[in-house]
């Protein structure tokens, strides 16, 4: 997978990508990074690529000429024309499903705007995908592009050495990940849940699934609508709701839901 980023700040992209897991993946050749400085495509000797907005209003806009020329030069490097992703808050929000879709591409071009954005005529000519990383406004597109590159890279074979972890982590089946524990077994008086020390794999799997369901229900109930739930999962969720209702009505005997150890 080749990530090609068009930006006014290539060093920001280069530095972040050359660190940690992405840095190792670049060195190993599992992913490849190219950057283009849009300023190199300015149509004046001083490298200016922004100007005032027609119709008034505060702020400067990136001009269409340099942006289109930079995109065409980048796309020309590839046999098949790559998707050109413009990162903007005025778009559909990036999700794990979108990361999976992009991870199947051979090459991706990211276009990062600055100032008030980019002239609409350039966008309508070259952009194939408009993507936001959330409903807030950042000063430029570099951080959103990095967020997406990170999320996509970890799905590229060879980037994470343990391929299973890319699958199981948060959002697998559209559920949040279960809680995890490492040594010590007792931390400030709090024990690791005993089932995790039992060595009983089927019970551990069931416990993890239930904790994923519990956590998703508590923190992101919206995800449950589209989660891949089994009939066992539904029974567990119904049971949680029933317990809550009993508790709220004051008629529940709290202890009946506790394990022997918790009592
Ligand atoms: N550029 C500025 N804010 C952004 C956001 N939230 N997502 C994507 N690109 C952006």
Image (cartoon, grey):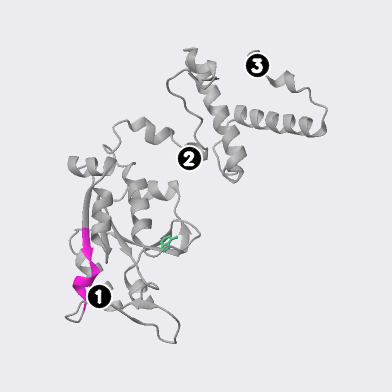
For disc 2, the marked residue is 171
Q: If the picture is divided into quarters, which one holds ligand 1?
A: bottom left
Please rate how many residues cluster around mark 3, counting C-alpha atoms within 10 Å: few if below 14, some from 14 to 19, many from 20. few
Q: Secondary structure at mark 2?
A: loop
Q: In this image, 45 relative to 163: left or right? A: left
Instruction: Tell me what residue is drawn at x 73 percent, y 19 percent.
Output: 255
Q: Position of residue 259 (x, y in %)?
A: 65, 16
For disc 3, the marked residue is 259
Instruction: Tell me what residue is drawn at x 60 percent, y 30 percent.
Output: 233
> Of discs 2 and 3, which sits in the foreground?
3
Which badge, 2 or 3, comes first in the chain's sequence?
Answer: 2
Please rate how many residues cluster around mark 1, counting C-alpha atoms within 10 Å: few if below 14, some from 14 to 19, many from 20. many
Magenta run includes residue 45 = no
Magenta region, residue range: 35-42
Q: Which sits in the foreground, 36 or 100?
A: 36
Which badge, 1 or 3, comes first in the chain's sequence?
Answer: 1
Q: Position of residue 3 (x, y in %)?
A: 26, 53
Instruction: Tell me what residue is drawn at x 20 percent, y 73 percent.
Output: 41
Q: Is mark 1 within 8 Å of ligand 1?
A: no
Q: Secondary structure at mark 3?
A: loop
């Amino acid at each position: 997978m080749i990530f090609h980023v068009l930006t006014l700040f290539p060093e920001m992209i280069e530095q972040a990508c050359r660190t940690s897991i992405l840095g190792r993946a670049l060195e190993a050749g599992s992913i490849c990074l190219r950057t283009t400085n849009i300023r190199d495509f300015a149509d004046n000797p001083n490298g200016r690529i922004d100007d005032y907005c027609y119709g008034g209003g505060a702020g400067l806009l990136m001009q269409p000429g340099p942006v289109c020329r930079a995109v065409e030069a980048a796309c020309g490097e590839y046999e098949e024309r790559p998707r050109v992703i413009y990162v903007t808050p005025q778009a559909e929000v990036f999700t794990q499903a979108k990361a999976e879709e992009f991870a199947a591409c051979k090459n991706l071009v990211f276009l990062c705007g600055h100032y008030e954005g980019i002239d609409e005529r350039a966008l309508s000519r070259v952009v194939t995908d408009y993507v936001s990383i959330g409903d807030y406004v950042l000063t430029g597109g570099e951080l959103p592009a990095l967020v997406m590159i990170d999320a996509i890279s970890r799905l590229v074979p060879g980037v994470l050495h343990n391929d299973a972890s890319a699958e199981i982590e948060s959002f697998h089946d559209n559920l949040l990940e279960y809680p995890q524990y490492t040594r010590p077994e007792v931390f400030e008086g709090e024990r690791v849940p005993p089932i995790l020390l039992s060595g009983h794999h089927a019970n551990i799997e069931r416990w993890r699934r239930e904790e994923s369901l519990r956590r998703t229900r508590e923190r992101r109930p919206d995800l449950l609508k589209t989660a891949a739930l089994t009939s066992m999962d539904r029974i567990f969720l119904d049971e949680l709701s029933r317990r809550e209702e009993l508790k709220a009505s004051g008629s529940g005997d709290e202890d009946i839901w506790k394990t022997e150890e918790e009592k």
